[in-house]
Image: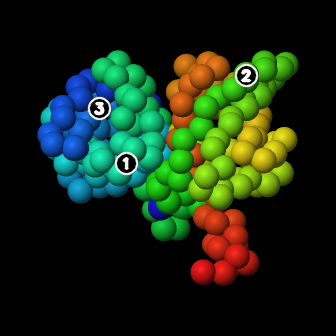
Amino acid sequence: MFTGIIESMGKIISLTSEGSNVHIEVKSPITQELKIDQSLAHNGVCLTVVEINSDNYVVTAIKETLNKSNIGDLKVGSFVNLERSMKLQERLDGHIVQGHVDQTAICTNIVKEKGSAYYTFKYEGIYGNITIEKGSVTVNGVSLTVVNSKEHEFSVAIIPYTVEHTNFKEFKKGTKVNLEFDVVGKYIKRLTQGY
């Protein structure tokens, strides 16, 4: 479980294919604090640390992860948002995030305002995911509040600190992002629709 509060960014050092899997080597300021088998969210995708080498570590993404997220689009030099799993007895500053990406979306607009920036995202409706006004959504692992919720589209308002300390600063129109919709909302939707 995660909170959606990004700890740091990591830089992709190498990508190595093995069958349908991709081994991703990441350089990170938190590598020294990691251990083998630890869960770590990369742009909101929960991946397991399988190797540690000095300031770099390696995680492996399977085909399902590559198909459902933007992890398969990473290149050497790309930056990813990083968050270690939450500890019990810590503050839950964001919202409950599982690290299981539901689908991707495309950034369709960025509007800079005095003191904040509005990012708009459009996603396909084939999975039945929804947002609600003032509800929670995770974009590339960042816990955010939805504004301007529409069918298959929503916006978020972001303060300068978040832009500067996440890979939002690299977003432009057409950027593909990972979405994880609010887990409580997903359960309620499933219960009301039945099995």
Q: Earlier in the sequence, mark 1 or mark 3?
A: 3
The residue pinned by badge 3 equals 26
Query: Along the line of sight, which residue is nearer the eye, 137 or 164?
Result: 137
Is the C-beta separation of discs 1 and 3 under 8 Å? no
Q: Residues within 10 Å of mark 2 (few under 14, many from 20)?
A: some
Question: Which callout, 1 or 3, points to the residue nearer the camera?
Answer: 1
- Look at the numbered discs 2 and 1 and tell me whether their residues touch, using CB distance below 8 Å: no
Query: Can residue 115 be spotted in the picture?
Result: yes
Image location (x, y in percent) of residue 190: 65, 73
Task: Report which residue position mark 2 lands on.
Answer: 110
Q: Earlier in the sequence, mark 2 or mark 1?
A: 1
- On the picture, is 157 further left or further right than 143? right
Q: What residue sits 39% from the left and 44% below the top?
A: 67
The residue depicted at 71 percent of the width and 55 percent of the height is 130
Q: Secondary structure at mark 1?
A: helix
Name above or below for residue 178 compared with residue 171: below
Residue of label 1: 65
Alpha carbons under labels 1 and 3: distance apart: 17 Å
**How many dots with numbers?**
3
Q: Under tag 2, what secondary structure?
A: strand
Q: Dividing the image into 4 quarters, which one contains the C terminus?
A: bottom right
**Residue density around tag 3, few if under 14, some if 14–19, many if 20 or more, within 10 Å:** many
User: What residue is at 29 percent from the left and 32 percent from the top?
Assistant: 26
174, above or below 96, in the image: above
Give, as a three-letter code, the residue at label 2.
Ile
Nearest to the eye among marks 3 and 2: give it: 2
N-terminal-most mark, 3 or 2:
3
User: Left or right of 141: which side holds 162?
Assistant: right
Question: What's the distance in space between the residues labelled 2 and 1, CA to CA?
Answer: 27 Å
Q: Residue 81 location in percent, x, y?
A: 47, 35
